[in-house]
Image (spheres, rainbow, N blue to C red):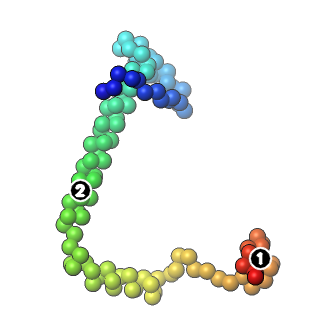
Amino acid sequence: MSSTALKFTLRFRNRQTHEILGLLAERQGVSKNQLAEEMIEREVQAAALLLSEDLTGTLELLRGYRREAHLEQAIADFAHAEAYEEDPIKTSMVRSSADDAFGISQAFIA
């Protein structure tokens, strides 16, 4: 660990959390800064462990994936979606300037 302390400003949205941190720090005989850092460190380590487990699970799924086992169905699913599903970005022509409230069609007139 580096001997140079890094700085990070922490803003509390909940006044009660800040007050409780002060009470706990006083009771433990440490600064609010030290207590907050120790608590954050524990939470970050726990979150990192969960992330690691999640990524390990994803990696195992990827290792078990066999393209040849899924390719035909993936092609069929894609073709079906292209032919029969509703197009989420369907476009339409502006028929009159009244339909073009923002004047966008003017940008395409030569």
Image point 34% across, 35% down: which residue?
Answer: 43
Q: Position of residue 86 (x, y in %)?
A: 51, 81
What's the residue type where badge 2 is placed?
Gly
Residue beneath label 2, please? 57
Q: Earlier in the sequence, mark 2 or mark 1?
A: 2
Describe the element under mark 2 as helix, strand or loop.
helix
Decide which of 88, 75 is in the foreground and name it: 75
As shown in the figure, which amino acid type bears the numbered disc 1?
A: Gln
Q: Is residue 14 left or right of residue 26?
A: right
| Quadrant (top left/top right/bottom left/bottom right) for the N terminus | top left
> Would residue 82 be visible to someone looking at this image?
yes
User: Which residue in the structure is indicated by mark 1?
Assistant: 106
In the drawing, does residue 52 fall left or right of residue 78? left
Residue 25: name its quadrant.
Answer: top left
Question: Is 105 located above or below residue 17 in the figure?
Answer: below
Residue 51 is marked as: none
What is the crowding at mark 1: few (fewer than 14 residues within 10 Å), some, or many (at least 20)?
Answer: few
Residue positioned 80% across, 79% down in the render: 97
Q: Residue at x 47, y 29 (%)?
A: 8
Query: Which residue in the rendered view is the most extreme toward the bottom?
Result: 83
Q: Within the image, what quadrant is residue 77 found in?
A: bottom left
